[in-house]
Image (cartoon, rainbow, N blue to C red):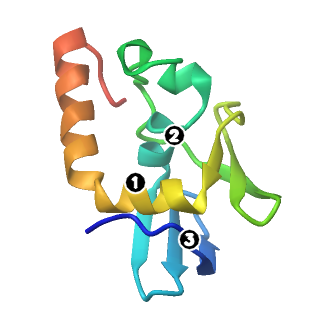
Amino acid sequence: MELQNECWPTEIRLSPDKRSLNIRFEDGSNYGFEAEYLRIESPSAEVQGHSPSEKKTVSGKRDVKILSLDPVGNYAVKLRFDDGHDTGIYTWRYFVELGQQFESKWSDYLARLDLEGLRRD
């Protein structure tokens, strides 16, 4: 499935336990994200670096929670996590990418953890 140019959410819901975020888009697509996945795939330079070779493997985030979602214009939200991380701006398009590419991104993350001797806990 190819990413659309404009992806507009119709519903954004943070779970009561703050461990997951559900986003429904106007095209009918719906993605449920665990806070851990959103944290380890943060679009911030702190996590992504300035090139693919600089991407950091973030470990120990299995129990991270989303404290808040702050609107950024009409195109994104800034997530604030309970570990203090709050520098990633998640565009609607990035949420769609994360949803569509979950399997490959998650598999890659688990492989990087193993390779680097790191853990999710």
- Residue 98 — which label? 1
Residue at 60% of width from left, 76% of height from top? Answer: 8
Q: Give the residue drawn at x 49%, y 47%.
A: 38
Rendered position, 1 above or below 36: below
Q: Which residue is mark 2?
A: 39
Task: Point out which mark residue 5 bears.
Answer: none
Place of residue 88 in the rendered image (x, y in percent of width and height, measured from the top left): 65, 38
Q: Is residue 38 left or right of residue 81?
A: left
The answer to the question of whether label 3 and label 1 lie on touching residues, with beta carbons closer than 8 A, is no
| Type of amino acid under label 2 | Arg
Residue 68 picture quarter: bottom right
Side (left or right) of 97 relative to 92: left
Alpha carbons under labels 3 and 1: distance apart: 15 Å
Q: Secondary structure at mark 2?
A: helix
Marked residue nearer the N-terminal end (3 or 2): 3
Judged from this view, the residue extending furthest toward the front is 5
Q: Are marks 3 and 2 in contact (CB under 8 Å)?
A: no
Badge 2 local density, few (<14 within 10 Å), some, or many (20+)? many
The three-letter code of the residue at mark 3 reads Glu
Q: Nearer the viewer, mark 3 or mark 2?
A: 3
Identify which residue, 28 or 4, lies in the foreground: 4
Q: Which mark is residue 6?
A: 3
Vertical order, 117 against 74 (above or below): above
Q: Residue at x 43, y 13 (%)?
A: 54
Q: Position of residue 113 (x, y in %)?
A: 25, 22
Q: Quadrant of residue 40?
A: top left
Name the residue type under label 1.
Leu
